[in-house]
Amino acid sequence: MSLVAGVGQAYALDPREAGMQATNIALNSLGNTQPVLAIIISPYRFDAPSIISGVASLLSNVPMIGMSSSACMSVDGPRTHVVTVALLGGDIQAETHWFSSYSQGSGEIGTRIMQLMGYEQRPVESVLVFGDGLNGNAEEFCQAVAAHMPILGGLSTGDNLNNSTYQFAGTQHSTGGMSAAFLRGNLKVGWGYGHGWSPVGNHFRVTRSRGNWLRTLDGHPASESYAQLFRHPAREWSLSPLNHMVRIYPLGFEQSGRPDLVIRAPMRVEADGSFRMNAPLRDGSDAYLMVGSPDKCKDAVQNALATARASLGHARPVMALVLVDMAWQLLMQAWPGIEIQIIQSLLGADVPVVGGYTLGQIVPANSKEQEHPQFLNQHIVIALFGEKN
């Protein structure tokens, strides 16, 4: 049976109704093929149990995996008040797992996923994960996972002020969790990633960090270092809009075994002037200010897609999953949805595209030197789902 994909989007005042309508559209796209997996991306403002109830009412026992996002993406571009449902059907098998304690022990969840893979003797073609982007430690999670695992995914966006997002697998959901889907069968997933940020020469030293908080740069509160550079008072960096716009001014770090800089981007500026990150930083490390370019971001989309198509080999792509860092949403406001437009123009109108904005991305190790999957900030990740044979 051929691999088939269908994508539906719907808006309704009632989140349950939106979930039902989006699912119905996706089912119609599948035709007579029975769905095997549902991928759901929904606005963080929408009630998760209502969405799950609406989707599940039409899918019965079909495995589901999903996350919240600041905007859902499809061929129509980013939309902030719609529920998006993508369905895969055909000669594949999917099973989903729910981990409610990701934010308390991210590394333990990585170990648990490795154990689940070990229990099954059947090979896994791909592991798709959605984790909490505001809580937890994605870098610790990746360090607990072996390099050979074909894992990719994204960290959900949500209410930055209340520090809440949601993820779900099946009917289970919460803030601070991680959902995972194991995909097997006649499936091949090709992936590529890239970004449009470059160092501009400004150099800092991390002089104090605690957990996921960057306290001081060059001995001064992080907001003061940015205030001197951008000529905005330090106190304004903890207020809107600067406390959110700080996302587009990340820091790049040198790392052994990596020719490029590892990017770590603030999620917000706290009242005490510290930067809230979603990965810990090492005291004494050198950081380089990075600035994004829309033109380089557009080039990154094309390069990521080319890499994804190359890794897909001769398999025919049937769906594209696009996970874009939230920084792109801020940087590319003059070109909303340009990422999807580029992808669609190169893939063709017959390949559905689904995605959302994230606070970080997870991709497999891409070289023999890397011992673990990579946790990224500021990137776009494109995953192409195709038939193996």
Image: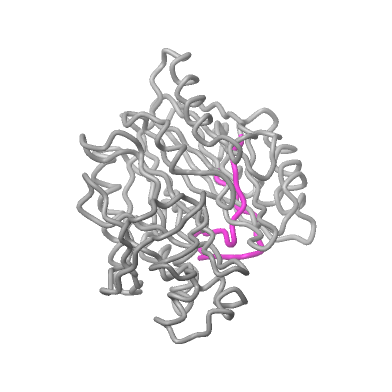
Residue found at the very far bottom of the displayed protein: 231
Q: In the rendering, at what x and y percent does residue 218 appear?
A: 38, 68
Measuring 62% from the left and 65% from the top, which residue is drawn there? 80
For the C terminus, the quadrant is top left
Identify the image quadrant of residue 91.
Answer: top left
In the image, residue 92 sits, relative to residue 378, either above or below, namely above
Chief SS of the magenta region: strand
Q: In the rendering, at what x and y percent does residue 287 appear?
A: 33, 63
In the image, residue 120 sits, relative to residue 362, either above or below, namely above
Measuring 74% from the left and 60% from the top, which residue is drawn there? 12
Please state the total of marks drawn on the protein image: 0
Residue found at the very far right of the displayed protein: 14
Q: Nearer the viewer, residue 169 or 74?
A: 169
Q: Is residue 17 left or right of residue 360?
A: right
In the image, residue 308 sits, relative to residue 229, either above or below, namely above
Q: In the rendering, at what x and y percent does residue 214 appear?
A: 48, 59
Q: Nearer the viewer, residue 97 or 348?
A: 97
Q: Is residue 9 left or right of residue 373?
A: right
* Residue 284 is one of the magenta-drawn residues: no
Q: Is residue 388 left or right of residue 38?
A: left
Q: In the rendering, at what x and y percent does residue 325 appear?
A: 46, 59
Q: Nearer the viewer, residue 110 or 78?
A: 110
Measuring 37% from the left and 64% from the top, which residue is drawn there? 251
* Residue 78 is one of the magenta-drawn residues: yes
Q: Look at the image and give the residue range highlighted in magenta.
A: 64-86
